[in-house]
Image (cartoon, rainbow, N blue to C red):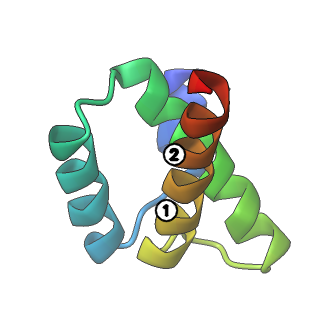
Amino acid sequence: MGKGALERFCRLRPEAEHFLERVYRTRGMSARTCHKVLRVARTIADLEGSKAVSKTHLAEAVGYRALEEKIWEA
Protein backbone atom coordinates (compact mmCIF):
# COMPACT_ATOMS: atom_id res chain seq x y z
CA MET A 1 0.00 0.00 0.00
CA GLY A 2 1.57 3.26 -1.13
CA LYS A 3 1.34 6.69 0.47
CA GLY A 4 -1.74 7.65 -1.53
CA ALA A 5 -3.54 4.45 -0.61
CA LEU A 6 -2.57 4.89 3.05
CA GLU A 7 -4.10 8.36 3.07
CA ARG A 8 -7.22 7.11 1.33
CA PHE A 9 -7.87 3.89 3.25
CA CYS A 10 -6.24 4.47 6.64
CA ARG A 11 -8.41 7.28 7.91
CA LEU A 12 -7.52 8.00 11.50
CA ARG A 13 -9.82 9.23 14.21
CA PRO A 14 -8.43 12.42 15.82
CA GLU A 15 -7.30 10.66 19.01
CA ALA A 16 -5.59 8.00 16.89
CA GLU A 17 -3.72 10.64 14.90
CA HIS A 18 -2.41 12.27 18.09
CA PHE A 19 -1.43 8.87 19.48
CA LEU A 20 0.48 7.97 16.32
CA GLU A 21 2.31 11.31 16.32
CA ARG A 22 3.32 10.78 19.96
CA VAL A 23 4.52 7.22 19.33
CA TYR A 24 6.37 8.35 16.19
CA ARG A 25 8.31 10.96 18.18
CA THR A 26 8.95 9.00 21.39
CA ARG A 27 10.00 5.74 19.72
CA GLY A 28 12.01 7.44 16.98
CA MET A 29 10.12 5.59 14.26
CA SER A 30 11.03 6.04 10.62
CA ALA A 31 8.37 6.96 8.09
CA ARG A 32 8.63 3.44 6.69
CA THR A 33 7.99 1.90 10.12
CA CYS A 34 5.10 4.28 10.67
CA HIS A 35 3.52 3.14 7.38
CA LYS A 36 3.95 -0.51 8.40
CA VAL A 37 2.21 0.18 11.70
CA LEU A 38 -0.61 1.96 9.85
CA ARG A 39 -1.09 -1.00 7.50
CA VAL A 40 -1.31 -3.42 10.43
CA ALA A 41 -3.71 -1.10 12.27
CA ARG A 42 -5.88 -0.90 9.12
CA THR A 43 -5.98 -4.70 8.99
CA ILE A 44 -7.00 -4.87 12.66
CA ALA A 45 -9.74 -2.30 12.02
CA ASP A 46 -10.93 -4.30 9.00
CA LEU A 47 -11.13 -7.49 11.07
CA GLU A 48 -13.33 -5.62 13.56
CA GLY A 49 -15.48 -4.14 10.79
CA SER A 50 -14.44 -0.56 11.56
CA LYS A 51 -14.31 2.06 8.81
CA ALA A 52 -11.78 4.23 10.67
CA VAL A 53 -8.58 3.32 12.48
CA SER A 54 -8.90 4.02 16.20
CA LYS A 55 -6.31 4.59 18.91
CA THR A 56 -6.95 1.01 20.10
CA HIS A 57 -6.14 -0.38 16.65
CA LEU A 58 -2.92 1.64 16.54
CA ALA A 59 -1.92 0.62 20.06
CA GLU A 60 -2.34 -3.04 19.13
CA ALA A 61 -0.28 -2.57 15.96
CA VAL A 62 2.47 -0.74 17.89
CA GLY A 63 2.46 -3.60 20.40
CA TYR A 64 3.02 -6.11 17.61
CA ARG A 65 5.86 -3.96 16.29
CA ALA A 66 7.50 -3.84 19.73
CA LEU A 67 7.16 -7.62 20.04
CA GLU A 68 8.72 -8.10 16.62
CA GLU A 69 11.67 -5.88 17.56
CA LYS A 70 12.15 -7.77 20.83
CA ILE A 71 12.12 -11.16 19.09
CA TRP A 72 14.63 -10.14 16.42
CA GLU A 73 16.99 -8.52 18.92
CA ALA A 74 17.33 -11.76 20.89
Hey, what amino acid is under mark 1? Answer: Leu
Q: Position of residue 40 (x, y in %)?
A: 66, 48
Judging by the rendered image, the residue that carries numbered circle 1 is 58
Toward the right, the furthest residue is 47
Q: Which mark is residue 66?
A: 2
Q: Nearer the viewer, residue 66 or 74?
A: 74
What residue do we see at 31% from left, 54% from top?
20
Residue 15 in the image: above or below residue 7: below
Residue 45 in the image: above or below residue 9: below
Q: Is residue 26 left or right of residue 30?
A: left
Q: Nearer the viewer, residue 5 or 37?
A: 37
Q: Are marks 2 and 1 in contact (CB under 8 Å)?
A: no
What residue do we see at 50% from left, 32% from top?
35
* Mark 2 or 1, closer to the camera: 2
Residue 28 in the image: above or below residue 27: above
Q: Position of residue 56 (x, y in %)?
A: 50, 77
Which picture quadrant has residue 69?
top right
Placement of the N terminus among the 4 image quadrants? top right
Placement of the C terminus among the 4 image quadrants? top right
**SS class of the residue under badge 1?**
helix
Residue 58 in the image: above or below residue 69: below
Hey, what amino acid is under mark 2? Answer: Ala
**SS class of the residue under badge 2?**
helix
Toward the front, the furthest residue is 74
What residue do we see at 16% from left, 40% from top?
25
Q: Position of residue 41 (x, y in %)?
A: 61, 56
What residue do we see at 21% from left, 50% from top?
21
Q: Is residue 18 left or right of residue 57?
A: left
Q: Nearer the viewer, residue 22 or 16?
A: 22
The image shows a total of numbered marks equal to 2
